[in-house]
Image: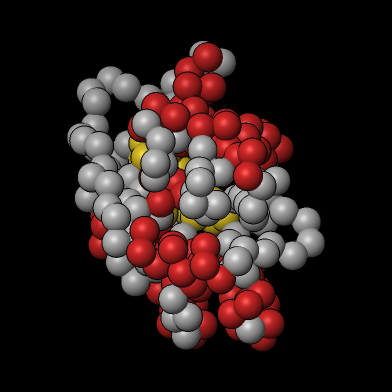
Amino acid sequence: MKGQFRLPRLLALSLLLLAACTKAPEDSAPVPGAGPVALFIGDSLTAGYGVDPEEAWPYLVGEAWSGRGLSWRARNAAVSGSTTAGVLEAARWALTPDVKLVFVCIGGNDGLRGTPLAETNRNVDALLTELKRDRRTVVLAGMKIPPNYGRAYADGFAELFPALAKRHGVTYMPFLLEGVAADPRFNLPDGIHPNPEGHKKLAASVLSFLDAQGLPK
C-alpha cells in the first residue's frame, strides 16, 4: 500500500489476541513423481486465518500454476500466531527435498508486540541463512506496522526486510498487503486479516510479482 499504513490501536491490539490462534499445517510428505514445491511460510496472513484453506492466497497461486500447465505445487506451511522467533523451527518439517522455492512473509506479530528490532533482525537473518541451503530460491516479502507504535520503531521495522533481502541476495517483494491492508472491502470484520476477496487480490499480486521475476524457474 502506497503511503502510510494506518490501523486503529484497537485493531492492532486485537491482533495480539488473534496471534494465539494456531492453524495445523497440512501434510507435507513428498509425492513420488510429482513436480517441485513452492513452500509458503509465515503467520496468519499467509495461513489464511478466518477463511477456508482453498481460499487462502498460497492455494490460489498453486491453482493458477496448475491452470497454466506448470508442474510446480504450492504448499502452505504458515501457522497463525507465528513470530520470527518460532517460524524456522515450525517450517523445518516442511523443508523436504522437493522444496525448490520458499516464499516468506513474517514479522507482523513481532512488530505489533514491540519486539526489539535487533531481535527480529537476528531471527530473520537466521531464517534466510537456513532457507538458502540446498540452493533453494528464496523470496522475502516486506511487512509494515501502524505508525502509532512510534515513528522510529515503525520506520526501522519496515527497513529491516529490504536490508536483509539485500544482505542474503534473495528476491524482495516490498509489501505483501499492498492494496489490501486497511481496506474494508478486502478484510474480515477484524480489519486485519484478508477475506476471500482479499486473498484473491493477494494471489494476483504475488503471481504478478513472481512472473516479473521469472519465478518459479
Which quadrant is home to the C terminus?
top right
Locate residue 191, reporting x and y percent: 55, 52
Q: Is residue 152 left or right of residue 109?
A: right
Can the viewer see residue 203? no
Q: Is residue 197 left or right of residue 55?
A: right
Q: Is residue 104 above or below residue 89?
A: above
Q: Is residue 131 above or below residue 148?
A: above
View extreme (right): residue: 3
Locate residue 141, reporting x and y percent: 57, 55
Residue 15: quadrant of the picture = bottom left
Can the viewer see residue 28? yes
Q: Is residue 18 left or right of residue 194?
A: left
Q: How is the image coloured?
A: secondary structure
* Residue located 32% across and 22% down the image: 34
Residue 74: quadrant of the picture = top left
* Residue located 44% across and 35% down the image: 56
Front one among 142 and 111: 111
* Residue located 36% across and 58% down the image: 18
Q: Is residue 98 above or below residue 156?
A: above
Front one among 129 and 201: 201
Residue 47: quadrant of the picture = top left
Locate residue 167, reporting x and y percent: 59, 71
